[in-house]
Amino acid sequence: MKPVEHVSIGGYVFSLEEDACAAARKYLEELGSFYSKVESGAEVMEGIEERMSELLLEKAGQGGVVTLPMVESVMATLGKP
């Protein structure tokens, strides 16, 4: 059994395995750092988080546990700045 953390992404609460949570947090921090220098970057980040939550809901379902491969798949879909 892996420890899980409960986090809010895009207005939805998810249960993420510890390693998945660390990867998602690092990814969102990197994007946040990049978009903080761009006009309307806050709105862009909001949109990214909303899309991330939609993709995670598709993969894990409502109340499911999000794994690292799921997070990696979402990050590959969303891409890097």
Image: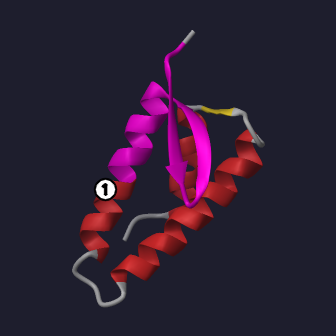
Question: With respect to residue 69, does 57 lie above or below?
Answer: below
Give the camera-side residue of 67 and 81.
Answer: 67
Type of the residue with mark 1 = Glu
Q: Residue at x 43, y 71 (%)?
A: 45
Which residue, given by chain and number where applicable, does mark 1 sit on?
Answer: 29
| 21 relative position to 35: left or right | right
Q: How many numbered discs?
A: 1
Query: Which range of residues does the magenta coloring cover?
Result: 2-27
The colour scheme of the drawn protein is: secondary structure
Q: Element at badge 1?
A: helix
Decide whether residue 52 is among the magenta residues: no
Q: Residues within 10 Å of mark 1 (few under 14, many from 20)?
A: few
Question: With respect to residue 1, does 26 lie above or below?
Answer: below
Q: Quadrant of the N terminus?
A: top right
- Residue 36 screen position, x and y as percent: 26, 75
- Residue 75 screen position, x and y as percent: 51, 54
**Which residue extends farthest top?**
1
Residue 29's quadrant in the figure? bottom left
Question: With respect to residue 33, does 63 lie above or below?
Answer: above
Decide whether residue 11 is among the magenta residues: yes
| 66 relative position to 45: left or right | right
